[in-house]
Amino acid sequence: MKKYWLLLSVVFCAVFTAYSQEFAPVKQTGVNDKTSIGLGAGLDYGGFGGSILVYPQRNIGFFAGAGYAIAGMGFNAGAKLRFATDKPISRIAPYLLAMYGYNVGIAITNMKEYNKFFYGPTFGFGIDYKSRPSSRGYWSLALLLPIRNPDYKAYLDDLKTNHSVVFKNDFSPVGISIGYRFILN
C-alpha cells in the first residue's frame, strides 16, 4: 500500500511542478473546450468506452461516461475542476475530479450470472495535454482513488466459499485513466 501512496505523491509533485513552471508557454488562441467527447480506458470512461464533458464555467465541468467494463456495461458521472487561467497557457493543464459510479466490477469466467458491479465515489487528479495550442483535441491522463464499498469483499468471500470460485488477483487500491478528448466547441 505504501508503494501506491509513494507513486501517487511522485506523480502529483511532477504534475504541479511542470504546471507551475509553465514549460512551452504559448499565447491563448481561443480554442478552449466547452464541450468535448472522449474515448479511453478508466473509470471515468465507464471502463473501455466514451464520455461527454461539458464546462458551464471555464474551470468547472461535468461529465458522464459509459463503456464495457468486462463484467458488463459500466457507468460513471462526476465533476472536473481544471486549473485554467487567462494568463498565457501551458500545454499541460492539471485537474482534480470526483465521480460516482461503478468502481468494482467482478467478472467470473463461464459463470456470467455471478458478474456484479459495486458502486461508490472515486477521486483523482490528472493532466490534460495539448500537443499544440490550436489543436481540436488533447490527451487526458489521471490517477484515481476509488472509495470502495466493503460489501464487495463479502461477495468475493461468498463466491469463494459457496461457489468454489478461485481469484487469481486482487483489486489495486488506485486506478489509472487515459483517453483522447475531441473538442466540439
Image: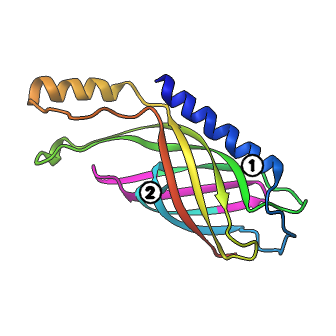
Q: Is residue 161 left or right of residue 100?
A: left
Residue 159, placed above or below residue 181:
above
Residue wearing tag 2 = 41
* Residue 143: mark in rendering: none
Q: Is residue 67 left or right of residue 129?
A: left
Three-letter residue code for mark 1: Ala
**Spatial separation of the CA atoms under disc 1 and disc 2:** 24 Å
**Mark 1 crowd level (few <14, some 14–19, many ≥20, 10 Å Cα):** some
Outermost residue toward the right in this view: 87
Q: Tag count in the figure?
A: 2
* Residue 18: mark in rendering: 1
Rendered residue at 65%/76% (across/down): 184
As helix, strand or loop, the secondary structure at mark 2 comes to strand
Rendered residue at 86%/56% (across/down): 85
| Magenta stretch holds residue 127 | no
Three-letter residue code for mark 2: Ala
Rendered residue at 30%/25% (across/down): 153
Mark closer to the chain start, 1 or 2: 1
Percent x, y of residue 149: 41, 28
Percent x, y of residue 67: 39, 59
**Mark 2 crowd level (few <14, some 14–19, many ≥20, 10 Å Cα):** many
Percent x, y of residue 166: 14, 32
| Magenta stretch holds residue 55 | yes
Residue 105's quadrant in the figure? top left
- Identify which residue, 12 or 35, lies in the foreground: 12
Quarter of the figure that contains the C terminus: bottom right
Percent x, y of residue 18: 75, 49
Q: Which residues are magenta?
A: 54-75
Rendered residue at 57%/48% (across/down): 142
